Amino acid sequence: MDKLIAGKTISVTEEGFMTDFSQWDKSIAEAIAAENDISLTPRHWEVIDYIQNEFKNDIPLSIRKIGKSGVLDIKEFYQLFPMAPLKTATKIAGIPKPVSCI
Amino acid sequence: MKKVVIIGAGTGGTMMAHHLRKDLDKSNRSVTIIDERKEHYYQPGFLFLPFDQYKPEDIVKPIADLIPEGVEFINTAASRIEAEKHQVLLQNGSTLPYDILIVATGTEVAPEEIDGMAGEEWGKSVFTFYTFEGSKALRDKLRDWQGGKLVVHITEMPIKCPVAPLEFAFLADSFFKDKKMRDKVDITYVTPLSGAFTKPKATATLEYLLKEKNIRIEPDFAIESVDNEEKVIRDYGGRSVPFDLLVTVPTNKGREVVEISGLGDDLNFIPTDKGTLQSKKHPDIFVIGDATNIPTSKAGSVVHFEAEILTDNILSYIKGKEMKKEFDGHANCFIETGEGKALLIDFNYDHEPVTGTFPIAGIGPLRLLKESRFNHFGKLAFRWIYWNMLLKARPIPFVSARMNLAGKDF
C-alpha cells in the first residue's frame, strides 16, 4: 500500500515497513521516527547506518546480534528506540521487518 | 566404498540412518551414527508430562533399539569435526574419516545466557519443560502447587517448536480448570514477538484463544534478567512481570561441538542451503533439523520432510549429479488448545498457515487452523506414528514432503 510520508508517496507494508529502499531518505526517516515519538540524534543515525549496512551485506538482524555488534549494547538500543527497538529501528532505517522470528 | 557418518541419533539422525540403509547400494557404503546418549526421547511428550497426561516411560526408548541393522552405532560424543581433513574426532580417542558427514546435533537450552535464570530459584519456582528432566521436575511442582501467578515465557527466537509454549499455556488453563482451581491461577504469556505467533493469520486465531481462556499476553518483551529475590523478570525496556511460577523457554543454541569446530553462527547453528540442506561452506557436509540456520520452524515434522529430500540429494551427490534444490520449508504442527481439542497448521517458506482441510483436499479429516477434537486425537496418535513410522522413514499416507497448496483457503 502507499502512504504519504514527509510529503512523498512511499510504498509500505500493512505494518508500515518500507518495501522499496530506493525511496528512503533522511527526511522520511525523521518522519517515521516522529510517528514513533522519537527525535533522531547523531547517536540514532550511527545505529541506523549500522543497521542499513548489515542489511546491505545480507546479515540477518536480531537483538542478540546488535548487543554483540560493538556499536551499542542492548540497554542503549532500548533507550534510543523504546519498546520494540529492532522493529522501530528497522522501520526508520527503511528496511524490511527482520525475520529473526519463525 | 562411501563412508557416511551421522552425528546425532535424535529424530533427524535416526531417520537418515533408516533412509540411507534402504536407499544406498549395500555393497558400496558404510553408515555410522554417533551419539553419547543412551536414550531417545519423544520430545512432543515433554509438553504432556508436566500435566501427568503422559508417563515418563511413554516417551523414552533406548537409542540402540532404534538404529537399523547394518548401521554402526558408536555410543560416544563427537568432540570435534575437522572439516578440512574430512574427519570427526571422538571422545573415546578414535578418529572417524568420512566421505559424507550429516550433522544432526539439534539444539539445547542455555538458561545461563540470561542473568539470574539458572539462579537459586531454578528448579524451585523457575522451570523449563524443554528437557526431559525439566519437564519431570515441573510435573512434580504442579502436582501440589497451590496457585498464584503463572508466567509462561519465551527468552528469544529461534526456539524449537515455536508453538509449544502457547500449547503449554492452553493446557495449563485446562489443567487448572480440571483441578477446580483456575480462579486461583493468573496466567500471563510473555513473548519477545509482537504477538502470539510469527505469522499474521495464525496469530489472530491464537490471540482469540488466549483471550477466550483469560490468558494475558505481554508482547515485545526482551528479557534482561530473572530477579530471584523479588521473583520478577525484567526486560531491557524497564518493564517487569512478577511470577510465583515461571515456566520459561531459555535461549536455544546449537551444540558445543559445532562451536568448537568453527562451523556455526553466533547461536551455533550451521549456515545451510535452505533448498539442498548442504553446508554453505563444506560440500561434503549436510545438515538436518534443528542444527541448521534455515528459516523454517525447528520441529520434528520439518525434519521428516527434510529427510526425504536430503536422501535424494545425497544419492545425487554420490553419483556426481546435480542436487534437486527442493526443500520448501514445509512444517506441519498440531497445536493443543486444551479441553481435548487441537488446531493443525501446515505451512512453508512462502505460505503462512491458513484454514482448510488436511491431508486430503476438501475432505480432511483434519481441519487446518480450526479447533477440533479430531485434531487432538491426531496429536495423540502421533506418538505411535513417530516411533513406528517416522523414525523408521516409512512414508505417511497422503502427506508429501513438499507442502500441498490444494485444500487451503488462500
Image (spheres, helix red, strand yellow):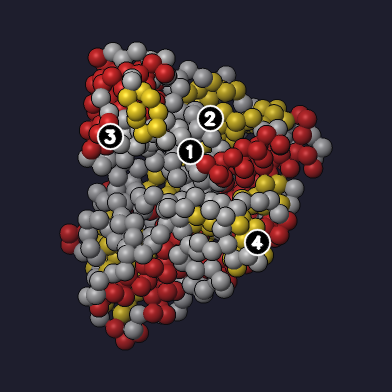
For mark 2, what is the residue? B219
Q: In what element is the residue under mark 2?
A: loop
Q: Chain of mark 4?
A: B
Residue B319 visible from this viewpoint: yes
Mark 2 to mark 3: distance in Å? 28 Å
* Between marks 2 and 4 in the image, the one whose residue lies nearer the viewer: 4
Mark 3 to mark 4: distance in Å? 42 Å
Residue B7 visible from this viewpoint: no
Query: Do marks 4 and 1 both belong to one polypeptide chain?
Result: yes
Mark 3 to mark 1: distance in Å? 35 Å
Q: In what element is the residue under mark 1?
A: loop
For mark 1, what is the residue? B250
For mark 3, what is the residue? A21
Q: In this image, B235 relative to B409: left or right?
A: left
Residue at 75%, 48% (x, y): give it. Answer: B339
Q: Is residue B275 above or below residue B263?
A: below
